Each structure stands twice: as C-alpha cells, then as structure tokens.
Amino acid sequence: MRSSLGPSILITLLVIGSQAGAQTPPLSEVPAAIAEPARAQLIRQRAGLVDQQGSIAAKVRAHNERCADVAEGSALEATCAASQNQLNALIADYRAAAESFNLAVTSARRAPP
C-alpha cells in the first residue's frame, strides 16, 4: 500500500480478513449443562456473533480489494482511511461482544445433575 494508512493497517486487515477471529477471542461453546432458558438465549447470541464475524470478514475482504494499492494523496486514500476507521470500530465492538458472551457462558448457572 502506498498511502499514509501504512503497511501495518493492510497487514492487520489481511489477517482479520483471512481469519475473522484472528485478533478476537474465540467464541465459547455453550455447554449442555447450562440451565434453560439461559442456554437457549446463549445459543441464539452465539449464532448472532458468528454471523457478525462473517459480515466483518466480508467487509474486510472488500476493503482490502479496494484499498490494497492506493496512491498517496488520491481521493481513494481518504475513502480507504474512513473505511479503515469504520472497520476498526466494528472489530472493537465485536471483540467486546465476544468477550462479554464468553463471560456470560462461564458465569451461567448450571442445571442440577
């Protein structure tokens, strides 16, 4: 990339794009031992996070395709920088949601044996 965005941004996006969870915690599986209705809610929440992760990965791939070789000072440079900022925010939000989900799984009440 030949812009002020810098090579580290492209590398970060390539890593995230190739493996959307590379810089985020892996999502915990929802154990069968969690009491209902919490288990059903956690399963729905996990499915939503998996979808969100896929959506972010697709956006990162599109950004990388569009912004891989941007000339410094071009109109596309500003667009790519704005896109990068939006992706950073999406990734940060996803990371926080994944961490919160994992904590919820860990702390969920277990059904009696």
Image (spheres, helix red, strand yellow):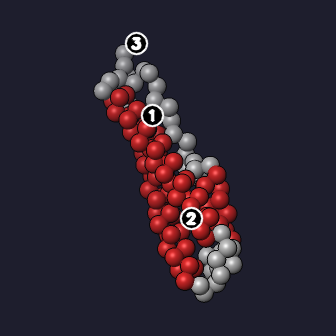
Q: Which label sits in the foreground, 1 or 2?
A: 2
Q: Which label sits in the foreground, 3 or 2?
A: 2
Q: Residue furthest left?
A: 37
| Residue 61 pos. (x, y %) | 59, 58
Quadrant of the image occupied by residue 14: bottom right
* Type of the residue with mark 3: Pro
| Secondary structure beneath label 3 | loop
Mark with earlier residue (1, 2): 2
User: Quadrant location of the N terminus?
Assistant: bottom right
| Secondary structure beneath label 1 | helix
Q: Which residue is drawn at 61% across and 61% down?
A: 13
Q: Residue at x 55, y 73 (%)?
A: 80
Quadrant of the image occupied by residue 76: bottom right
Q: Confirm or deny contact between disc 3 and disc 2 (CB under 8 A).
A: no
Disc 3 to disc 2, how far (Cα)? 49 Å
* Type of the residue with mark 1: Thr
Residue position for label 2: 63
Q: Confirm or deny contact between disc 1 and disc 2 (CB under 8 A).
A: no
Residue position for label 3: 113
Number of residues whose C-alpha sits closer than 10 Å to that of mark 2, classed few (under 14), some (14–19) or many (20 or more)? some
| Secondary structure beneath label 2 | helix
Mark seen at residue 106: 1
* Type of the residue with mark 2: His
| Residue 73 pos. (x, y %) | 60, 87
| Residue 7 pos. (x, y %) | 68, 71
Q: Confirm or deny contact between disc 1 and disc 3 (CB under 8 A).
A: no
Can residue 103 be seen at all in this image of the molecule? no
Seen in the picture, residue 71 relative to 12 is either above or below; the reply is below
Seen in the picture, residue 22 relative to 32 is either above or below; the reply is below
Foreground pick, 94 / 104: 94
Mark with earlier residue (3, 2): 2
Mark with earlier residue (1, 3): 1
